[in-house]
Image: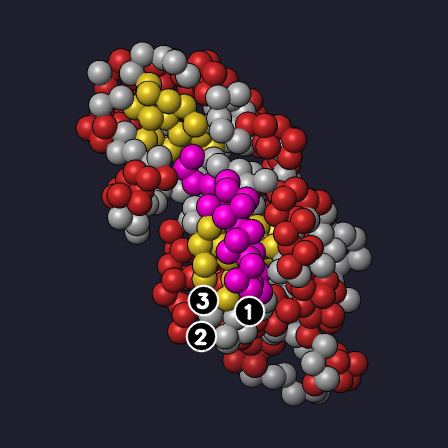
């Protein structure tokens, strides 16, 4: 009789994956960190074909990719009108890998001066360690941007709508500058999402995301993404391999599930934000509403040309400064006070003590970010409930 392997051997080796003959409707979570080698895979792996292999369904090691991460990369590339995509462990992993794959020691680059705070500190604290210099310019002043570019730049970096005032760069002008200078544009498209705006259709080379926000959409993951041509994605992926910010298959599964409802969620968030902005503009207790869908927004005419929807982010300048803003937020029944954005639930925060503590008060006020400003990430609740909630909270803040 054939000798039976010991219990330990059977424990380890008897739980085996057998590819099914039918295809599951939902993409499974491939939690394996490593895959069995075959001669062909081994040959390709040792000749450095890592990324192309994942594209062919030949997986080796989870940092290089897995069927779960690859499925969401393909979906994101399609949404962003890109050839290819790479997913990461966070938005910052996507931004750092995308930036470093386009920069070398000695380079300088031009960036918008209105950035997510940690991106700003990546540019001012981390990149200088590699002898890479950033020049900041106002993304709404194209002459200033052009002047900065003339000093020589390897890259242009902007956000498609800035936090929290939703300022929108003139992408037509930026695309011309990119073409003339040869500096590719990287756009952080987190706030607008590919449903509302696709940077690659507007002259950008790379679109990056904090997938933690709208793409995931349920405030339950931290992930990042970059979409570009296959050639650029291969460079970004290569940098990710070394920096190590690879995506986890469990999170990629949740991202894939979130993506299925992205267009529905964003359409609802666009409508809700527009309804709230229109209702609150000029309301008692409100100094100003910042929303690119309002004709009063300084970049409305650019947003109207570029965006298919104006997004789910807005900010309300509450009369009475920080105290009134806090009172307003705490009086909300549905809007929850939290720092993130892009989820199905309405979230509110005051930038002066959250997202913008990294700049001086003078700089912040200079940008128009007052102490009474409340940033709102509008959710998918019923707009009538949200409007009633915001109006009641404004009364309570007076
Ligand atoms: C516009 C924007 N970009 C990038 C990031 C960084 O993303 P993550 O927190 O997923 O690393 C954030 C985070 O808040 C953000 O708001």
SS for dot 1: loop
> In the rendered structure, which segment of residues is drawn in magenta?
138-165
The residue at 31%/45% (across/down) is 363
Image quarter where the C terminus lies is: top left
The residue at 27%/21% (across/down) is 319
The disc at residue 133 is 3
Q: Is residue 9 left or right of residue 318?
A: right
Judging depth in this view, the residue of 235 and 212 nearest the camera is 235
Q: Is residue 215 left or right of residue 126?
A: right
Q: Are marks 2 and 3 in contact (CB under 8 Å)?
A: no
**Image spot of residue 5 (x, y percent):** 61, 84
Note whether residue 62 is visible: no
Image quarter where the N terminus lies is: bottom right
Label 2 Cα neighbours within 10 Å, binned few <14 / some 14-19 / many ≥20: some
**Image spot of residue 178 (x, y percent):** 64, 54
Q: Are marks 2 and 1 in contact (CB under 8 Å)?
A: yes
Height in image: 30 above or below 172? below
Q: Which residue is mark 1?
A: 103
SS for dot 3: strand
Q: Is residue 281 left or right of residue 202?
A: left
Height in image: 341 above or below 180? above
Q: Is residue 185 magenta?
A: no
Height in image: 96 above or below 270? below
SS for dot 2: helix
First in residue order: circle 2 vs circle 1? 1
Q: Which residue is mark 2?
A: 130
**CA distance separating discs 2 and 3:** 9 Å
Q: Are marks 3 and 1 in contact (CB under 8 Å)?
A: no
């Amino acid at each position: 009789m054939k000798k039976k392997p010991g219990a330990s051997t059977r424990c380890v080796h008897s739980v085996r994956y057998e590819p099914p003959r039918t295809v599951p409707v939902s993409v499974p979570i491939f939690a394996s960190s490593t895959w069995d080698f075959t001669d062909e895979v081994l040959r390709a792996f040792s000749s450095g074909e890592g990324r192309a292999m994942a594209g062919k369904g030949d997986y080796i090691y989870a940092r290089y990719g897995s069927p779960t991460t690859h499925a969401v990369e393909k979906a994101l590339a399609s949404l962003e009108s890109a050839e290819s995509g790479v997913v990461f462990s966070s938005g910052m992993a996507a931004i750092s890998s995308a930036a470093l794959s386009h920069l070398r020691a000695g380079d300088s680059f031009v960036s918008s001066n209105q950035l997510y705070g940690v991106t700003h500190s990546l540019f001012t604290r981390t990149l200088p360690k590699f002898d890479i210099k950033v020049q900041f310019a106002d993304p709404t002043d194209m002459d200033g941007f052009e002047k900065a570019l003339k000093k020589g730049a390897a890259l242009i970096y902007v956000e498609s709508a800035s936090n929290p005032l939703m300022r929108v760069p003139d992408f037509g002008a930026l695309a011309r500058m990119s073409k003339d200078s040869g500096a590719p544009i990287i756009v952080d498209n987190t706030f607008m999402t590919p449903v509302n705006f696709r940077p690659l259709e507007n002259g950008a080379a790379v679109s990056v995301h904090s997938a933690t926000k709208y793409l995931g959409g349920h405030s339950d993951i931290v992930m990042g993404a970059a979409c570009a041509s296959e050639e650029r994605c291969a460079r970004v992926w290569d940098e990710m391999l070394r920096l190590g910010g690879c995506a986890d298959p469990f999170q990629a599964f949740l991202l894939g599930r979130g993506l299925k409802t992205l267009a529905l969620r964003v359409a609802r968030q666009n409508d809700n934000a527009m309804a709230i902005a229109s209702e609150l503009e000029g309301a008692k207790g409100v100094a100003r509403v910042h929303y690119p869908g309002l004709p009063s927004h300084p970049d409305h005419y650019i947003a109207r040309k570029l965006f298919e929807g104006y997004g789910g982010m807005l900010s309300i300048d509450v009369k009475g400064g920080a105290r009134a803003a806090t009172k307003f937020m705490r009086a909300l029944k549905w809007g929850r006070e939290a720092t993130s954005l892009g989820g199905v639930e309405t979230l509110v925060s005051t930038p002066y003590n959250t997202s913008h503590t990294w700049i001086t008060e003078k700089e912040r006020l200079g940008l128009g970010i007052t102490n009474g400003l409340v940033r709102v990430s509008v959710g998918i609740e019923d707009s009538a409930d949200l409007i009633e909630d915001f109006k009641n909270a404004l009364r309570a803040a007076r």
